[in-house]
């Protein structure tokens, strides 16, 4: 019996120390987590940098000009569908947009005036959390 009590006490101390250590390492602040999610979505999922950033002569993205707006890097493959000629600056939010406007665009596919962006911009139907993360991230850029 005594041996079981010692083992139980030892395991209890181990788990208490584990919980104490875990709580001492506070999770990132919600704003930081939201910004990281926004950056991930912009750069790795929606791939906004591919059209909204200028390219050099070799066709590579200008790393110091990411999301600053650019000429459209591709032409429409369809004669009946015109692609946008240029893309707006997204860093700091597009001109005339508030965060709420961008959230609406990313959730519904239309802007605050009810207009849809020209192709090849896809009509995103993001959830609220992802749209807000993107808006927060883009707002933080200059």
Image: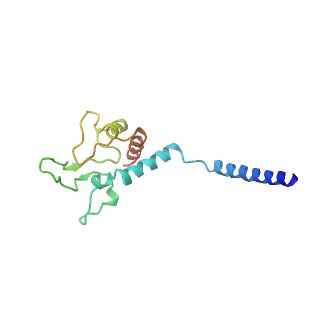
Residue at 80% across / 51% down in the picture?
9
Number of numbered discs:
0
- Where does residue 133 sit, x and y in percent of width and height? 42, 43
Question: Please, is residue 41 above or below residue 59 in the view?
Answer: above
- The residue at the point 30 percent across, 55 percent down is 50
Report whether 126 appears left or right of 58.
Answer: right
Q: Position of residue 98 (x, y in %)?
A: 34, 37
Q: Residue furthest left?
A: 79
In the foreground, 121 or 36: 121
Q: Work out whether residue 93 or residue 16 is closer to the camera in this orientation and state it.
A: 16
Give how far across and how far down residue 106 sits, in percent. Answer: 33, 41
To which quarter of the image does residue 114 belong? top left
The x, y position of residue 91, in whole percent, is 34, 48
**Of all residues shown, which one is farthest toward the front?**
1
Q: Is residue 136 above or below residue 78?
A: above
Residue most toward the bottom?
Answer: 58
Q: Residue furthest top?
A: 113
Q: Nearer the viewer, residue 136 or 126?
A: 126
Q: Residue at x 85, y 55 (%)?
A: 3
User: What is the basis of the colouring in this image?
Assistant: rainbow
């Amino acid at each position: 019996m005594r041996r079981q009590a010692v083992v139980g006490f030892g395991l209890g101390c181990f788990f208490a120390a584990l919980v104490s250590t875990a709580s001492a390492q506070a999770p990132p602040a919600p704003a930081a987590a939201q910004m990281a999610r926004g950056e991930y979505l912009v750069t790795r999922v929606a791939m906004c940098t591919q059209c909204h950033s200028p390219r050099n002569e070799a066709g590579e993205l200008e790393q110091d000009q990411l999301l600053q707006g650019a000429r459209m890097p591709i032409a429409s493959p369809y004669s009946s569908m015109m692609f946008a000629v240029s893309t707006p600056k997204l860093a700091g939010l597009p001109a005339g947009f508030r965060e709420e406007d961008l959230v609406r665009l990313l959730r519904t596919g239309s802007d605050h005036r009810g207009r849809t962006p020209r192709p090849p911009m896809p009509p995103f139907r993001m959830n609220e959390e992802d749209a807000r993360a993107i808006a927060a991230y883009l707002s933080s850029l200059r």
